[in-house]
Image (cartoon, grey):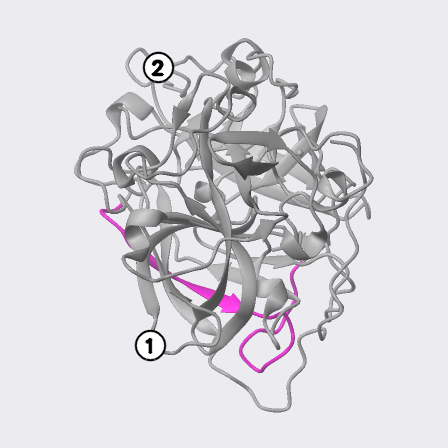
Amino acid sequence: MKSLTRFLALAIASSGLFFSFACGGGSSTSSSSSSSNGNSNVPVANTVQITAGSGPSTANPYTNGVFVSVTVCVPGSTSQCATVPDVLLDTGSSGLRVLSSALGNVPLANLTSGGATLANCTQYVDLTYNWGPVALADVKMAGETANSIPIEIIADPASSFPAAPFSCSNGGVANNTVDTLSANGILGIGSYIYDCGSACAPGTTSNGGVYYSCAGASCQVTTTALANQVQNPVAMFSSDNNGISITFPALADAGAPSATGTLTFGIGTQTDNPLGSVVVQTPDNYGNFTTVFNGVSYSSSFIDSGSNALYFLSSRVTGIPGCQLSQGFYCPAATERLSATNVGTNNQSINVSFKVANADNLPHPNSVFDDLAGTTSNAGSAGNGLPSLYFDWGLPFFFGRTVFVAIEGRSTTGGSGPYWAY
């Protein structure tokens, strides 16, 4: 099934550490912005509906994609706007990336320096990538607005924007159409404010190919100030800007054609977003925690709504057979019911029960499942610097619970971010 494509990016978080994605160079988390911690005297609408399903592409439909609508405007304008549906919701990255074709005729201005255009590259574990100019936009969801923030405009293949240099593409495939991306964009609302942070700021020797300066048809790797980097829109809201929560109902074993959930902005900032009795788990400087499975600890684990399955270990380690048709996924003879323990750097642990079904036999036409699982061993052997053995708790993890994501440096009722809580 082509739609069972893992979507795990290499440039996660503002830590700038090239270990994985969800969506990284050599520093600790960047400093937070100076905006408020999310408290507001005047509550605003802070929830939007999200949908798990197959997405907008009929040629390359998603399995277990989660999507949201985002309104993008020329800064300060209320008329020069486009509401973009079916944007992939990704807690494993930071920043908004939108297909140029999805914006229509909204005249966003590219960021320039010295006559050169600033471009952004996001690389993924499956050797695909996003490429395009950085532009300023107002980003709106529910009653919240991030004013004049940098976003990436994913360059249309027919546009006049320079082609991605090899250091960005690495010979891979560009996710620059609705059929290659299987979405109209990616909304990164993870724990970090900037998509690269201090690793790409002036004074560093290399940013690993995240930002480029393009003059004419030539694009060269460059550094750029934090203010010009693609930014997590939630962190730039005037209120409810200390984190988010995602809520989905539980699914039947057979899955469903689609599932409707809720994205809520802010943690403990309004009456509808209390942290409640969940357990808070803090990550390390790489954005990871430890998953203990069958008595073995895997310290490069993370939670990522942008990954369409639970990706963990390998058939050799787990003993679960791989698939004949759905390469890279597990296909046990019967659904296996397993458990693991997630442990944060704050030593808070949570036991997690999960299921692994036969990916070759998933019932159609359903496109949303809580028991789809694959291996991480292929990703780790691709020469991309990733560890081969870890847990990527993808979208199936979100069904039947509320998951909180706190933003770095922001005060919440559960302490300062970054953290996950569930």
**Left or right of 273 in this view: 252:** left
Q: Measure how far apart labels 2 and 1 are at the Cα level.
A: 50 Å
Determine whether the residue tagged by mark 1 lies in a helix, strand or loop.
loop
Q: Is 276 above or below relative to 340?
A: below
Give the position of the C terminus as an image quadrant. Answer: bottom right
What residue is shown with label 1? 79
Which is more toward the observer, 330 or 386?
386
> Residue flagged by tag 1: what amino acid is it?
Ser
Residue 259 lies in the magenta-colored region: yes
Determine whether the residue tagged by mark 2 lies in a helix, strand or loop.
loop
Q: Which residue is at 73% across, 64% downward?
A: 33
Q: Return the disc, 2 or 1, that comes first in the chain's sequence.
A: 1
Residue 97 percent coordinates (x, y): 45, 48
Binning the other alpha carbons within 10 Å of mark 2 as few (below 14), some (14 to 19) or many (20 upward) gives some
> Residue flagged by tag 2: what amino acid is it?
Cys
Residue 171 percent coordinates (x, y): 45, 16
Q: Is 346 above or below relative to 290?
A: below
What residue is shown with label 2? 323
**Left or right of 13 in this view: 332:** left
Q: Which residue is at 66% across, 75% downward?
A: 38
Give the position of the N terminus as an image quadrant. Answer: top left
Mark 2 vs mark 1: in front: 1
Q: Which residue is at 28% across, 41% downward?
A: 178
Q: Quadrant of residue 284?
A: top right
Binning the other alpha carbons within 10 Å of mark 1 as few (below 14), some (14 to 19) or many (20 upward) gives few
Q: Is the magenta stretch mostly helix, strand or loop?
A: loop
Residue 368 percent coordinates (x, y): 31, 43
Q: Is 409 above or below relative to 24?
A: below
Which is more toward the observer, 28 or 156?
156
Residue 22 in sight:
no
Q: Give the range drawn in magenta.
A: 256-278
